[in-house]
Image (tube, rainbow, N blue to C red):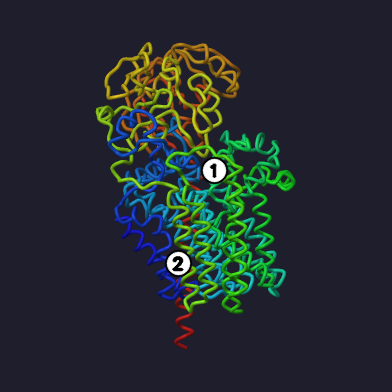
Amino acid sequence: MALVLYFLTVLLLFALVHRFVRPLSRAAMLVLFAIPLGILGYALVTDSVYGPIDYLYQDQPHKAFAAQHGMQGGARNASAIDVFSEFFPWRRAVQMSFARGEWPVWNPYNLCGHPLAAEAQAAPYSPFTIVALVLPAPVSMTFTAAIALFLAALSAFLFARELDCSEAASLVAATGWGLAASNVVYSQTAMGFTTVYIPLLLLAVRRVVHAPRVRSGMLLTIALALTVLAGHPESLFLNVLVGCVYAVFALARSTNRWRAMFTAIAAGIVAALLCAMFLLPLLEAIPQSIEYESKQFVLGERPRGVAQSQFLMALATNVFPHLHVRRFLQPDIGYIGAETAAVGSIVLAFALYAIWRRRSADTWFFTGLGIFCMLCGARWAPLSDALKEIPLLNITLYDRLAFAAALCLCVLAALGVEELLRRRDFRAAALSLGVVLALLGIGTWWISRGVVLDVVAADYGHARRFAELFFLGIAVLVVAWRPRFVVPALIAILFAQRTLAEHDTFRTFPAQAAFPSIPMLEPLEQIREPFRLVGQHTAFPPATNTFYGFEDPRGYEALTLKQLVQTWAIWSDPHGSWYYRVDDLEAPFLSFLNVRYAIQSDDRPLPAGWKQIGAQPGAVLLENERVLPRIFVPPRVYVGGMSEEEIVDRMSLIRDFSQVAWITTHDPITERANGPGTIALRSRRLGGEYVFDAGMQSEGYVVISDSSWKGWRAYIDGKRVPMHRANAAFLAVLVPAGQHTVRVVYWPRSFVTGRAITFGTLGLMIAFAVMSHFRNARVTAG
């Protein structure tokens, strides 16, 4: 199924490109189709899961099944935690939303619920996400990786062709960019999927500058819309920044500057309108998040540059890829997590050959841009600290411009191969490649003697040194030999090099190894009333629960509600950089959070207030005897304008949250009796809706332990009423005395407005296309 879906998607893309962008030969299509298969072919053919799911088996309860699924040892790729903990679960959440017939606006599974589409990176409206949803969620990520690498290759090929490179030379750029280290490692992330569109964006910019017409404007609109919907706003900004720099370069040699600029601005506006359903909720959610505050007051203030030793080693990862994402023990400079522009020694050698032999404006531009972006990626202090002073860049991780540097090398390599074919100076090319081989050989020898790296699981990246030197040596021999099929041979050698170098970025696992059934948890699937479940310490890592249909107050998300983070002090503990864990199951606030069940290692004592209800080797399942329902009426409330910090301080002293709640309003602070009342849940929609009957003896606040992102609406007997914030970060509704039906639903106005704009714009575009078609048909007939 995965291979068939990949084949059909690629076939459709070829048809669209051949019809609307540029004709493609069958040979070119065959090579482009095959580029991702060197890494993902086996996974596609066998419907397997390509990705870091070996992380799942590092902790209980899955650790008990590690041997059964061949997961002994540590997780291979230390840089891939986001893929496992965010992108796999997001895909499942989006899939379940659409399966329920709901818009993917709310994810109930993590952090007491949070926006799904509005945090962007789940990319629910990307056409390639929607296509992938027909597959099981873990397998769909294999398809996502394959189509990301294909789109990278196709985009680079088309851009090189636009620079007047032959198909053969353009396939060098396609292979290099399609299998660039950054694209492979991030192929399943929103950042990676956004990045692969850089050459498509540059192609559209070039077309607009050289032929500012409706057709080129539409191409730019499509490129921008695809980049937006790929789901990584920061990478979108960097892509557009690179596109603007290229536009300035292209406009300097254009005679249609004003018309080109008008066309580009119009295309940008149309793309924004087309993506309004995605953009408006995102713009509403960002200011509510702790990440926004952190970027403003932490990222924006701290120095960006690194020490010279770290800068040099980070720069070296572009040329010696086996150093990437490794910890340096000798010299003792620690972990080098800088982004890399590594595309392989063959691409690097031909890029240097182009700089030497091809004297053109394009060569100088991509050389200058590549050096600039490479220095940003390595976080060179003078440049990084200067860029930090520029608005928007001050809250952007612009070391990711290293990805654009990788593209520059691929474009230069294509220009170099084209120059080789034009000049037929094989001796000079062989000399150039030989010099690079010698320098890399000496450098590799010196590094092996002077640098000690930390050992990594499964010897991750072990083949890179061999691939870099061996295949470059073969390329030198081929160029020196000068066969008639020199370029096809170089493409095959480059493909082999990049495949061997990146083949072990992730492992491929049978589909049944991805989030297998846990017998201990199966009885919980029959429970209808809402509840949450946690793992103590590192058990059952956050977001794992999504694949089992359970909700968890923990999580690791792109956007985290600022007020919710402030409550973490009274119920959770930090764990590295990627989530807060629950160590103390006796924390009273867990009961308020509707945490009814917990998974605990079987060597830990039973916490007070919990009872054991299940067990398996290495882990036990506990039930909280003090858990509060998701919706309840506390008998006493404090109402008024208290800060979240003050509320959390007061809550830290409470042992029983069934008796009291804090309601944030603009009124003076008062303590009063609340209710009493009874709640009977009538129905619940996981997309963000509760319908319940409230029997109130007197007026009172009904508290709901879902996080209070903007966008929640409350209706009492069909009439809309205000929502309030309870306990710093949760929901409350003031219900009058009597028997009432209450409906609480997450339905942001930003989404409703954006959806109307998106479908209105799409309708106008379709109408314009139909009118243009009939007008052209009449002109042709006349």
Instruction: Give me the C-alpha separation between circle 1 and circle 2.
Output: 28 Å
| Residue type, numbered disc 2 | Ala
Give the labeled residue for mark 1: 325
Q: Is residue 469 at least partly visible in the picture?
A: yes
Give the labeled residue for mark 2: 492
Kindly give the residue lying farthest to the bottom in the view shown: 782
The image quadrant of residue 122 is top left
**Which class describes the residues within 10 Å of circle 2: few (<14), some (14-19), or many (20+)?**
some
Image coordinates for residue 316, horizontal then vertical, percent: 62, 49
- Residue occupying the point 40% across, 65% down: 33
Checking the image for residue 694, the label placed there is none
Image coordinates for residue 267, horizontal then vertical, percent: 58, 63
Image coordinates for residue 375, horizontal then vertical, percent: 67, 51
The image quadrant of residue 293 is top right
**Which class describes the residues within 10 Å of circle 1: few (<14), some (14-19), or many (20+)?**
many
SS at mark 1 in the image: loop
SS at mark 2 in the image: helix
Q: Are marks 1 and 2 in contact (CB under 8 Å)?
A: no
As displayed, is residue 352 above or below residue 81?
below
Return the residue nearer the eye: 720 or 18: 18
Image coordinates for residue 749, horizontal then vertical, percent: 50, 43
Which is nearer the N-term, disc 1 or disc 2? 1
Return the residue nearer the eye: 141 or 322: 322
- Residue occupying the point 40% across, 34% down: 109
Return the residue nearer the eye: 355 or 600: 355
Q: Is residue 207 at least partly visible in the picture?
A: no
